[in-house]
Image (tube, grey):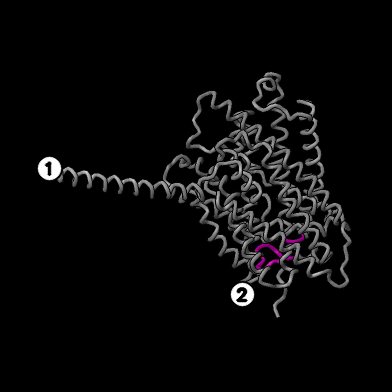
Amino acid sequence: MERAGGGGGDAGGDGGDQQAGGTASASRRGGGKALSSLFWHGGSVYDAWFSCASNQVAQVLLTLPYSFSQLGMASGIVFQLFYGLMGSWTAYLISVLYVEYRTRKEREKVDFRNHVIQWFEVLDGLLGKHWRNMGLFFNCTFLLFGSVIQLIACASNIYYINDKYDKRTWTYIFGACCATTVFIPSFHNYRIWSFLGLLMTTYTAWYLTIAAIAHGQVEGVTHSGPSKMVLYFTGATNILYTFGGHAVTVEIMHAMWKPQKFKLIYLVATLYVLTLTLPSASAVYWAFGDALLDHSNAFSLLPRSGFRDAAVVLMLVHQFITFGFACTPLYFVWEKLVGVHEARSVALRAAARLPVVLPIWFLAIIFPFFGPINSTVGSLLVSFTVYIIPALAHMATFAPAAARENAVERPPRGLGGWAGMYAANCFVVAWVLVVGFGFGGWASTVNFVRQVDTFGLFTKCYQCPPKH
């Protein structure tokens, strides 16, 4: 009896040890999953806000003082506020169309668990193939050149702390680094990167502000802007580009657990971004004035210090993150084209994505014109991609009375109902078509051609000071 009891006790002890071991193992798995969720799997309202704010202002922060030298202080501030508001409005329109499309499809029992909805698919589902093709062309071309700009910015920035290599060589190096973004599956996985990216941009913006004020005005500083119409509209379209970062709105919304909560996220992100862009651009322009007309990168005029080197390094990391933001929708389009989008293998999808990086790398080497290229992309691509097409698509989608009656998202209170929405959309289309695409396209193209004539394509070191 004692033996049996002892045996039973031993067995119970073994079972207890196994249970404790199983509990510990489960606890470790649970801890690992919680850690992975904390840093890797995002989908909350806060994640979307960090993504929007981080993506909206990256390298363009360094070119806004250059735009102020073209526009003048007053116009620079007014255009930032104006285009910030307009960008928030069209981001809201995109979010309305996404929710409308997804609701209609889910009523038809369509499953999106292994599929990322994109802007061109929203246009296709709501308005047909012609709208899809137009959206696909402008969106992909803009994101392609958006990625090119980030790569150019990496080379431009690193040169100011290490000029051992010319900017073209740095473009080769950073092209290889940025190619590693093929391993990031989707916008769910940018949680920690978005958070860090915004911290980095915030540091850089306030470094520019404080360093410019501490430096003071250079001797004989002049503030002659606006002096030429070409420069004026070139500067304006760079600001149009600055607040046109919502070409990835649909992908960010799709990564949310509750996409319906996106409505005001972009506006709040824009308000935060303005606290970074207005002080930094104003302070640097105040300190250096017209000297910025020949220095499109604000780092080039500030004296070298540990704080400046830290800002350069942080911006390099942030540009890597923003490259991923711009390129990920292109990766999705390419995956769908080659038929691996719903594959569960990360390695397979990463290998399939690599061809997308090659043309970006090549274009960054051909057109290394940091600053002027922003305005050209802003006028010719951003104007349609994130301003004109969303406003027109919203009007076309809700033109039928039945569509307005059954709309998932009603017009905002105080706007005047559907008539007020249509009036706002018509204003956006007219303004951006005439000022952004028309005057801006003319001015930025003239300025871009001037850079090609002055420096040439494939230039090794754009705007580099002569070495002694």
Q: What residue is shown at x 77% (from left), y 45% (from top)?
A: 83
- Which range of residues does the magenta coloring cover? 450-462
Say which label, 1 or 2, has the lower sequence index: 1
Looking at the picture, tell me which residue is in the foreground, 328 or 15: 15
Looking at the picture, tell me which residue is in the foreground, 270 or 159: 270
Considering the numbered disc 2 on the image, is that residue within a helix, a strand or a loop?
Answer: loop
Q: Is residue 453 visible?
A: no
Residue marked by disc 2: 164
Quarter of the figure that contains the C terminus: bottom right
Q: Is residue 110 above or below residue 351?
A: above
Q: Position of residue 21 (x, y in %)?
A: 30, 49
Amino acid beneath label 1: Ala
Q: Position of residue 308 (x, y in %)?
A: 68, 68
Q: Is residue 438 visible?
A: yes
Considering the numbered disc 1 on the image, is that residue within a helix, a strand or a loop?
Answer: helix
* Residue 4: numbered disc: 1
Q: Is residue 306 above or below residue 238?
A: below
Q: Position of residue 463 (x, y in %)?
A: 72, 67
Q: Residues within 10 Å of mark 2 (few under 14, many from 20)?
A: few
Q: Is residue 452 magenta?
A: yes
